């Protein structure tokens, strides 16, 4: 952290990149742990209705599905992400439509 800006969003962006790299390296368990932490921090920082939080949650849901955690992914999308996306982004937004397809 001492080499990066102290901006929380910058740190979260860097951690998102690390999580993506872990996925490419097929270190899916580690990537999933990090993606859960990143999502939780976005929720705490900006709230569930923020577009970055919704996008991060969508990425987490996709990772959960890849790991075979279908019920958890479905619950995340149905109970948290889709209502927030409909409220803040609108029903016709690309991300809302993607979430609708993935419930």
Image (cartoon, rainbow, N blue to C red):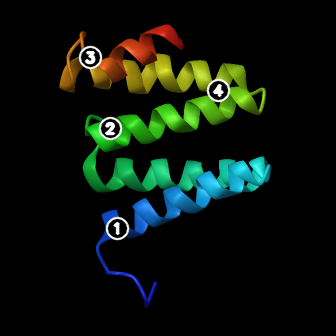
Q: Residue at x 24, y 10 (%)?
A: 92
Q: Residue at x 67, y 47 (%)?
A: 32
Residue 22 drawn at (x, y percent): 70, 56
Q: Is 13 displayed left or right of 68 in the figure?
A: left
Location of mark 3 (residue)? 86
Mark 1 or 2, closer to the camera: 1
- Kindly state the secondary structure of the residue where label 1 is placed: helix
Q: Residue at x 51, y 63 (%)?
A: 15
Are the residues flagged by discs 1 and 4 in contact, CB closer than 8 Å?
no
Q: CA distance from mark 1 to mark 4?
A: 28 Å
Residue 58 drawn at (x, y percent): 48, 31
Q: Earlier in the sequence, mark 1 or mark 4?
A: 1
Location of mark 4 (residue)? 72
Q: CA distance from mark 2 to mark 4?
A: 17 Å
Mark 1 or 3, closer to the camera: 1
Q: Is disc 2 surrounded by few (<14), some (14 to 19) or many (20+) residues within 10 Å?
A: many
Q: Is 60 displayed left or right of 86 in the figure?
A: right
Mark 1 or 4, closer to the camera: 1
Q: Earlier in the sequence, mark 1 or mark 3?
A: 1
Q: CA distance from mark 2 to mark 3?
A: 12 Å
Q: Earlier in the sequence, mark 2 or mark 3?
A: 2
Location of mark 1 (residue)? 10
């Amino acid at each position: 952290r001492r080499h990066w800006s102290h901006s929380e969003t910058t740190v979260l962006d860097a951690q998102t990149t690390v999580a993506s790299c872990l996925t490419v390296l097929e270190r899916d368990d580690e990537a999933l742990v990090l993606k859960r932490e990143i999502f939780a921090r976005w929720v705490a920082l900006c709230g569930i209705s923020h577009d970055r939080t919704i996008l991060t949650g969508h990425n987490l849901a996709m990772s959960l599905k890849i790991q075979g955690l279908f019920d958890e992914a479905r619950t995340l999308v149905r109970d948290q992400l889709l209502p927030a996306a409909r409220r803040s982004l609108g029903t016709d937004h690309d991300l809302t439509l993607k979430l609708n397809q993935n419930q």
